[in-house]
Amino acid sequence: YKDQLGSHMESLDKLFAEVETLFPEGSDFGETNAKDGIWDNPEKFEKTVKQAQDALTTFKAVVDKGDMKASAKALKQFGKDSCGSCHKAFKKKDD
């Protein structure tokens, strides 16, 4: 899906630019899969978001080179370092 990478990267850029705004102070109520640590330890959440954003920057640099094999490998690392690290720390396990 090499011809679709550009649109996917744009979507990731937009998502990662907004991640910090998804859990504002005072939104820790109702039914949610978010752990309390998002609100109880906002500094850790902000640090984790920053690491995820840095992981996206690294992933984009690999994708920009056009090497699909390297991009596939980088995608796995990106998932672990970005979404995976945030979900591990701040998302309740699915039932």
Image: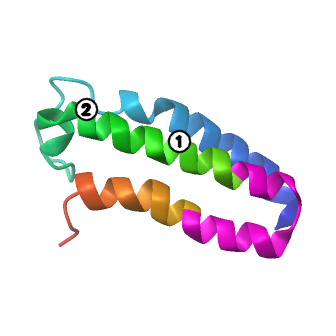
The amino acid type found where label 2 is placed reads Glu
Indicate whether 75 appears above or below 57: below
Instruction: Say which residue appears at 16% left-offset and 49% top-offset.
Output: 35
State which quadrant residue 27 falls in: top left
Label disc, if present, on residue 43 of the rendered structure: 2
Instruction: Say which residue appears at 21% left-offset and 40% top-offset.
Output: 38
**Quarter of the image where the C terminus is located:** bottom left
The amino acid type found where label 1 is placed reads Gln
Indicate whether 71 appears above or below 50: below
Is 93 situated left or right of 62 in this image? left
Q: Is residue 43 magenta?
A: no
Q: Separation of disc 1 and disc 2 at Cα?
A: 15 Å
Q: Secondary structure at mark 1?
A: helix
Q: Nearer the viewer, residue 21 or 68?
A: 68
Q: Secondary structure at mark 2?
A: helix
Q: Which residue is mark 1?
A: 53
The boundaries of the magenta stretch are 60-77
1 or 2: tag closer to the N-terminus:
2
Is 35 situated left or right of 85 in this image? left
* Location of residue 15 in the rendering, given as x and y in whole percent from the top left corner: 54, 39
Instruction: Say which residue appears at 63% left-offset and 38% top-offset.
Output: 13
Chief secondary structure of the magenta portion: helix
